[in-house]
Amino acid sequence: MDVLNLSIGGPDYLDLPFVEKVWELTANNIIMVSAIGNDGPLYGTLNNPADQSDVIGVGGIDYNDHIASFSSRGMSTWELPHGYGRVKPDVVAYGREIMGSKISTGCKSLSGTSVASPVVAGIVCLLVSVIPEEKRKLILNPASMKQALVEGAAKLSGPNMYEQGAGRVDLLESYEILKSYQPKASILPNVLDFSDCPYSWPFCRQPLYAGSMPVMFNATILNGLGVIGYVDGPPMWHPSSEDGNLLTIHFTYSEVIWPWTGYLALHMQIKEEGAKFSGEIEGNVTLNVFSPPAQGEKVIRRSTCVLKLKIKVIPTPPRARRLLWDQFHNIKYPPGYIPRDSLDVRNDILDWHGDHLHTNYHIMYNMLRDAGYFIETLGSPLTCFDARQYGTLILVDLEDEYFREEIEKLRDDVIYSGLGLAVFADWYNVDTMVKMRFFDDNTRSWWTPVTGGANIPALNDILGSFGIAFGDKILNGDFFIDGEQSRYASGTDIVKFPRGGFVHRFPLMDSSESRATQNVLISSLAKADSPILGFLKAGTGHIAVYGDSNCLDSSHMVTNCYWLLKKMLDYTSNHVQDPILFSKAAKLDMPLYEEDSRLPSRRNDVNFSSYSSVLGKELVCKNDSRFEVWGTKGYNIHVRGRNRRLPGHHSIDIGGGLNTSLENFKTSIPLEKYKKETAGNYLGFFNYKDELLDMPVLVTSHWLVPAIITIFGLLLLFTFWSFRQKRRRRRKGSSSGRLSN
């Protein structure tokens, strides 16, 4: 067998028996072609094995060269949440209303990527015949065939790289490439151009700027030299002009390439000297690869790969326009059973699309960019970013736990550094999770959710610093705010909130299992006013919380709440209060309160540490955080590395003033100093049962008490000084009297 087509697949990229069999096949020089799946138009929906780098993954188009709506989209999700996905599909082919043979007689029309994939497999078989039979085994392999297909493909105008890959497969162009093909290594894709929109989405939507999190791009190394290869020395960045030295690139890559493929990840960051630079930076990244001699050869095979970069750079935006997205605390299927956020969806129970800005939150990402926001991704703990750089930290549908240091730092970031916080939670109900377990025939074991739609106990830990907590209801229903209709799809309720905050309640139905088992039919449950949306000023920071994330997620969305997200960000980043959301009727005269013992609790029948990046793990900033904190625990004391000063570019302190408002910067204090001042006090303020102390009073107490003590000390010192002066005068007077006598 030389070519194998697989029009099957599934979402589990960690299905190791299957993955290892695919590796075995391709390592033995069998060219594998596979359909990427029919889960479009959703992003992050690639199926295994088409998502594997040594397999030719095929998407579908119609006869008008439009991406078929059913065709799955990239990016690949193996590396998420602690990395960045690869470009897939590799190519697209006609897959809508394709005529084929019926089993009985005649023809019939079929649609799907399962139709497009065998079309490409047929093209591969034709291309194999181009190479004389005596040379085929020396030249043709899964990598060289993919090189011929992607280099010969016709790029379509309109779709982006995660929709079309290299483009529509072109038999004749690939034929011309193979006629003169010499074994080589290459990078896929071999160009990253920030000016090429929409093809280079999402990179073309947001330029680079100094002070941002590194922009990550994960390319694939195709090694047509042999089944195994080695990277000879580190990759190199070659800027085409002096301005290119403003760009720093750190690389992570496969030192050993097997079978046929590896990865090259770029972590791109603009130096502080470029804080006011505006323009384009161009250059090449080169990578040297070698493989052992082929059969009958004595010389090592070598090749140099080239990746062309064209980066757009702008001056650093103001703090209020910069948002940070928490990707680190996301857990996705596999390896754990992470249930879908909306329990109304019965045919797709797994949350497997990556929960990334560029997968199932890609529409929200485009909306934020259109609104003028710059949104960056954090794939490391919350200690790994400088809060003074950002207007708002966004926490959406998060499932993981938090380090103690993260909780303490975020508390300080909001109260003292003026960081805004926007939280979108989701359902969490232990009885419902237990009811959702099922027996999996493949693994011969019972599967039970490792958490709910979101990890509410963990969110309550991090929000407890501000007197906020979510409950365990599963609420559903429609409601209106200012004429905007919204669907609350399996969201939770707010059960704790300080006095003086603004909370909105709506009549919603509770469909949680614990409620349904109280001898009441779900269909007959009466709607009750439930608090689901809250706003709070906490020190110098502003917080907005909402109990449902489904309205931001492109997967199975009924109605979006982008309008609400904008108003929340207006408040958290720009301190603008919408008159409807901040009406007197919504202001709390008395706090919402729930005993801690009645808050949602963690499950004790699930080994959560096997899925978590926090439990049992070390707190460390990884290579998707700023270079200067890589390998550390982060900004316990604000750290900013100093890069080599470049000719013609002044060094600028990003954290100190360029994009930090003076008002908020003056209130910033080091975390260690804050810990000493507030140890044992802050969290305890919200443990009083009457919970009458609201946030403004709480924050005032932090400066009022030290101020009173300071004033008292000064008065005491002044009294002591006056007393000493009087005694000196008396002594001087008595001495003068004795001399006169």
Image (cartoon, helix red, strand yellow):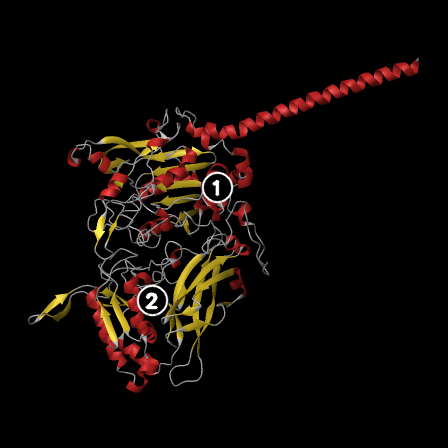
Query: Residue 466: x percent and y percent?
Result: 42, 34
Task: Answer yes or no: is residue 169 visible.
Answer: no
Is 193 or 4 nearer to us in this picture?
4
Q: Which residue is mark 1?
A: 409
Task: Answer yes or no: is residue 26 visible.
Answer: yes
Within 10 Å of the Cα at label 2, are there few (<14), some (14-19), or many (20+) other Cα atoms? Answer: many
Instruction: Give the amino acid at mark 1.
Output: Lys
Which SS class for mark 1?
A: helix
The residue at the point 39 percent across, 40 percent down is 570
Task: Name the residue at the right extreme.
Answer: 741
**Above or below: residue 461 compared with residue 7:** above
Instruction: Give the amino acid at mark 2.
Output: Ser
Is 14 or 385 nearer to us in this picture?
14
Q: Quadrant of residue 468?
A: top left
**Above or below: residue 582 compared with residue 22:** above
Query: Residue 49: x percent and y percent?
Result: 28, 64
Within 10 Å of the Cα at label 1, are there few (<14), some (14-19), or many (20+) other Cα atoms? Answer: many
Is 321 or 222 nearer to us in this picture?
222
In this rendering, would 141 be left or right of 235? left
Q: Which residue is mark 2?
A: 53
Which SS class for mark 2?
A: loop
Query: Residue 9: x percent and y percent?
Result: 24, 62
Task: Name the residue at the left extreme.
Answer: 105
| Quadrant of the rendering where the C terminus is positioned | top right
